[in-house]
Amino acid sequence: MRVPDLIRKKQHREVLTPQEIDFFIQGYSSDRIPDYQASALCMAIWFNGMTTEETAELTMAMARSGDQIDLSAIPGIKVDKHSSGGVADTTTIAIAPLVAACGGKVAKMSGRGLMHSGGTLDKLESIPGYQVFQDMDSFAHIVNTCGASIIGQTANLVPADKRLYSLRDVTSTVDSMPLIASSIMSKKLASGSDKILLDVKWGTGAFMQTVDEAAELARIMVDIGKHAGRPTVALVTDMNQPLGNAVGNALEVIEAIEILSGGAEGDLKELIMELSARILVMGEVFKRTDDARAALQEAIRSGRALDVFEQIIRLHGGDPAVCRDTSRLPQAASLVSVRAKSSGYIMSMDSDEIGMATVMIGAGREKKSDRIDPAVGLWLKKRIGDAVREGDVLAEFHVNDRTHEQAAIERFLAAVHIGSETVEPRDLIVKVVE
């Protein structure tokens, strides 16, 4: 086989065979295929797309490029949950103990974050002592002991995706549906779970700007799961305002603890409960989502969910006392109230810009080498549809380094649009693809 022949086939909208796709992925992963040929093929895919079968074969070839995680030491059906990203998305941290408290198993590998606040690993590392890297024996032991573990991905998990994503980033081929879907799903397939639940975001804080784009990405990934023999369900959810009120690593852990303690309501809790219920049904712990939701509510009411989170933290070497005393988490030196400059109603929010405002004060990364300050971020006090008067507090900024504080506040204020008319709330969950 010759790479120029594969490039030409995609240029002419022809279908690559599984053998040709595997040849490309294995060749690029082992440095036998240079970047300039790989970028030409990615560009041809960007222009002409791939069939469902091609995308599935690409995904499976990428998954085979590195470690294949074996979760057979953990009994029961393992359901992996993945979010396509967003702002103030703290779902994983609360879902793991909630599902475990109801008899499910969560054996999840997560990554770090770029932009906005950190990824799930960064948030967990804001808990003093929490060790996100565990060997596979310890990983299985923790899940079998308390029902859930969230750890860092192995260094050799889907190396083809790491190489291809870096190439796509510098060749403007990131926003290709087949390439996005294969990037996400290859890691899910390699992580060893039996079933997959996807949360695909749309809106100002998401990669997909419209419902139709998000639904199309969800459909492609569900089809990949079916092709690979991994039952997959996808929810298309709203990210036109931050999902939770906390944006920042330790702050998001605090909000997760509040939800597990029964002390918080809103969009974040609603989505946590929906995703948790579906995981329990997909994992065959319950037959109906209504029964699963009732069990989840009871796990919160009884305190069992918070008890399990304490166990998870302890088994990962962390300080479980943070669950009862959140002041043990990193604290910022300054608390700055950001006030409305006019009266009216919050008409819209640019979630991405709000997230970037927290990056300016150290809550996230613009490049992988950037350090994150776990204590900083913001806590929203108003959401879309709320009435505000001039001088009302819109958010509280938690700040240590004040160098870029004013610029971050101005960026936040520009992202919150106040008008004279009320706004009908959007549906949080707009579509289910299965």
Image: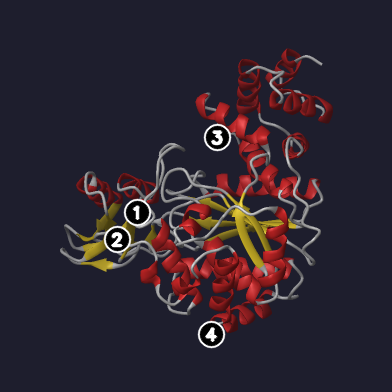
User: Which residue is disc 1 drawn over?
Assistant: 349
Q: Classify mark 3: residues with Cα within 10 Å, few (<14), some (14-19) or many (20+).
A: few
Q: Position of residue 118 (x, y in %)?
A: 45, 50
User: Which residue is disc 4 drawn over?
Assistant: 301
* Front residue of 281 and 433: 281
Q: Is residue 256 above or below residue 159?
A: below
Q: Position of residue 220 (x, y in %)?
A: 68, 44
Q: Is residue 329 visible?
A: yes
Q: Position of residue 301 (x, y in %)?
A: 53, 85
Q: Amino acid at mark 1?
A: Met
Q: Quadrant of the C terminus?
A: bottom right
Q: Amino acid at mark 4?
A: Arg
Q: Is residue 286 left or right of residue 332?
A: right
Q: Classify mark 4: residues with Cα within 10 Å, few (<14), some (14-19) or many (20+).
A: some
Q: Earlier in the sequence, mark 3 or mark 1?
A: 3
Q: Earlier in the sequence, mark 2 or mark 4?
A: 4
Q: Earlier in the sequence, mark 4 or mark 3?
A: 3
Q: Is residue 324 above or below residue 196?
A: below
